[in-house]
Amino acid sequence: MSRGNRALDITLAIKSRAKYAAMLTREDKRRICSLTSQDELVAYLARTRGWREATKALPVAAATDEQFSAALDQEVLGDFEALYRMASETSKDFLKFLTLDEELKAITEALRRLTSGSPSPPPDKAPPALRLLHGEDPARLRNARSFQELAALCQGGIYGPVLRSLELDRRTGLPSYSGAVLKLETEFYRELSRYLRRSYNGPGRRTLIETVSFRADMLNVSYILRLRRFNTPAEQALELLMPLYGAFSPETARAVLSAPSDEAAVEVLQASPLGKWLGGLGEAPPEKLVEAAEEQYYRKVIHGPPTLCAVYAYLILKENEAAMLKRAYVALGYGLSPERYML
């Protein structure tokens, strides 16, 4: 990599650190836990650096859950676009590949809507980078009017073969939502693993693989904890895991599955190479466990050497913060305290 490109990526990593500094603090989260209405949450976020712009897209009062979620998503995608434009060509190739993850989210949103029978959402405005980069325009995917239309839109990408292979219900003409999502996620991580090991030629490839693999590890941890509660046979469960193993090995997965209790399963995980990030699990559900571990791990990465890993870490942390705020917003809509839905 040329000195110019390396300098660009160092600047990019430093910019990611600056954006991370604008994310919510522990004090912010504590105050959000004391709020009593959705409008109060929007007003609070309007005073923060990290989410101020997102709130400008919302109505003055009574924003719907969908409007709130879309505003936060656009903020995350806008950050992605800004970072992408600053990157070197090698780093752009990696970030461009990650837009396949955004395509995956749009496909799963469409599948969730179609299987639930919900109406199509109003068209949204994706940042220009996501309309021009890898894959299909997320807005078109989200608004697909049928499974056949969705599959046709994806026919030229990595998800097309997966969608075509799904077994459809004769009555509804739709696939199983959970089964479809699992296969689509597996395809994304299979392609990502292949890209990192065969095509990525930037600096620090091994470190980048480790950083990306950690998220696949966390997904696998959450899956395996769920699967053991359903007494899923080990070989069947292993087939359902993401094909991008890092520190979470098949041997650890088998040990978790065969543990006699949830407490014993936790002990297995804590004794594994991932144990330093999985301390104090308690009774936390898998989703909170994953975000808590990612918070610790990626916070360390973002304050480490200024490399592409720091950029990836910031994007994961921002996405997780958005997910946390969405949970809090929905809870407030039901008159519940957001505290139990915040990390």
Image (spheres, rainbow, N blue to C red):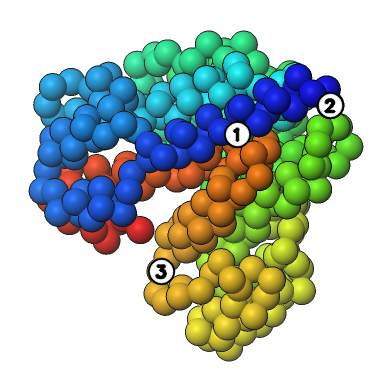
* Disc number lying in front (2 or 3): 2
Q: In the rendered view of the protein, which quadrant contains the N terminus?
A: top right
Q: Position of residue 63 (x, y in %)?
A: 19, 28
Query: Is residue 225 visible to us here?
Result: no
- Distance from label 2 to label 1 (Cα)? 16 Å
- Residue named by callout 2: 1
**Residue 56 visible in image:** yes
Residue at image coords 57%, 83%: 267
Q: Which residue is mark 3?
A: 284
Q: Residues within 10 Å of mark 3 (few under 14, many from 20)?
A: few
Mark 3 to mark 1: distance in Å?
32 Å
Q: Which mark is residue 208?
A: none
Residue in the picture at 42% in, 13% down: 125
Left or right of 167, for residue 105: left
Farthest bottom residue?
Answer: 260
Residue 131 vertical position relative to residue 303 in the rendered view, above or below: above
The Cα atoms of the two marked residues, 2 and 3, are separated by 43 Å
User: From what the image shows, is residue 223 above or below residue 299?
Assistant: below
Q: Residue furthest right?
A: 198
Judging by the rendered image, the residue that carries numbered circle 1 is 13
Residue located at (56% from left, 33% from top): 14
